[in-house]
Amino acid sequence: MISMKEYIDRAENCILKTYNRYPIVLEKGEGVYLYDMDDKKYLDFAAGIAVFALGYGNKAYNDALKAQIDQILHTSNLYYNKPAIEAAEKIVKTSGMKKVFFTNSGTEAIEGALKVARKYAYNKDTSKEYEIIAMKHSFHGRSQGALSVTGNAKYQEGFVPKDCVAVFADFNDLEDVKSKITDKTCGIICEVVQGEGGIYPADPDFLKGLRALCDEHDILLIFDEVQCGMGRCGSLYAHDLYGVKPDVMALAKALGCGVPVGAFVVGEKADGALVPGDHGTTYGGNPFVTAAVSKVFDLYEELHIVDHVNEIGAYLAEKLDALVEKYDFVKEHRGIGLMHGLECEMPVGPVITKAMEKGLIVINAGANILRFVPPLVIEKEHVDEMIQILDETFTEISK
């Protein structure tokens, strides 16, 4: 029998090393737990980086995908397919927006959203080289377009020419954003809750101010809800908590709960900016992934996921606050719904490693912030189990 160590060695020989992976090979999942090749059990508070909202092994979800495999997986976007139509209708109905374009990832959804903003401005005036205003410490993906609006130089260096980089403003500072608007500005993009940047929710007045600025200057407001959307913050779409509607919204991760799918969704103002020939995708919107999206929406409603997130999210917040009170090196707790961060005074890498040894998977959001983005179906008992392991880990680390 081939050992886990042997598989890891084989991976190092054939998979391009762009990640420093943890030394485990995860093999199966059940509920909110993962198991490695040695059958060690882990409580999962990362959910594949906020992806597996429904947990592992949901029978209704799995059956829907198996049924679609037996029908058809791919047709291309030269033709219509039923799952894509049904999934798009559910997004339009729940979001109150107008049209959907399915992509293969969140990064691709951002790329499409940026094209919508640029084309909207270009359709009005073809004479300018247009700019996007983005937020410092943001993260929108690793392709060149998405990197151009990612507010972290370490991701851009060596990849994005300086003249292609967005104009950056301070997150939650409306006056700074206002000062950056020129006649070349075609859009403003921000996460409703900054994820990779450290779990920072937007201030309500900031988002309302962005909406007003975009209306005043006739430019598009783009919300990146790739990580914070799809129920994670306690409403189906995070912006609904603020009562602010974007012109374009990017979705992915929990949208498909494990299959590679994303979407950008346009509202009334942005509808029509793109026309046939302006954008495309070979795999995006294929019957397999959109059958998954459609089933996710059905299960969210059936399982009352948003209500559950609000209940368990409040309980998790209370328990994380207690850790801040208990340990001097835990500086601050931030978060909303089931998207939380603990900021520590030291790098959290050793905490993550020690917790994993004890059977808990958590991840970071920056060098000194622990990120908690568990499956949205966790219960209070899972929160208690996580806190117990983390408490033990903190105690050992602090000795």
Image: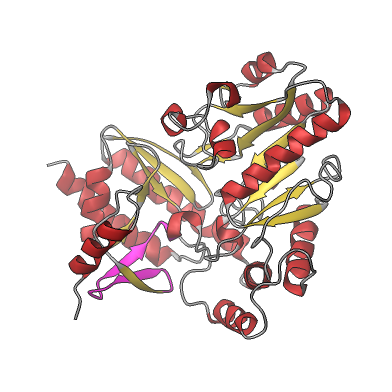
User: In the image, 388: left or right of 226?
Assistant: left
Residue ranking furthest to the left: 399
Tell me: residue 368, above or below residue 180.
below
Q: Position of residue 191 (x, y in %)?
A: 59, 39
Q: Position of residue 117 (x, y in %)?
A: 75, 35
Q: Quadrant of residue 239?
A: top right
Q: Quadrant of residue 128?
A: top right
Quadrant occupied by the N terminus = bottom left
Residue ranking furthest to the top: 179
Task: Please count the marks in the image.
Answer: 0
Q: Quadrant of residue 365?
A: top left
Which residue range is magenta in the image?
Answer: 30-47
Q: Kindly tell me whether residue 357 is visible in this rendering.
A: yes
User: In the image, 362: left or right of 208?
Assistant: left
Q: Position of residue 198 (x, y in %)?
A: 44, 37
Q: Kindly tell me whether residue 204 is visible in this rendering.
A: no
Tell me: residue 167, above or below residue 18.
above
- The structure residue drawn at horizontal position 54% and vertical position 42%, both measured from the top left corner, is 143
Q: Nearer the viewer, residue 311 or 81?
A: 81
Q: Nearer the viewer, residue 289 or 368?
A: 289
Magenta stretch containing residue 40, yes or no? yes
Q: Position of residue 171 (x, y in %)?
A: 57, 27
Tell me: residue 155, above or below residue 3.
above
Quadrant occupied by the C terminus = top left
- The structure residue drawn at horizontal position 33% and vertical position 36%, both measured from the top left corner, is 367
Colour scheme employed for the rendering of this structure: secondary structure
- The structure residue drawn at horizontal position 61% and vertical position 32%, both measured from the top left corner, is 203
User: In the image, 305: left or right of 50?
Assistant: right
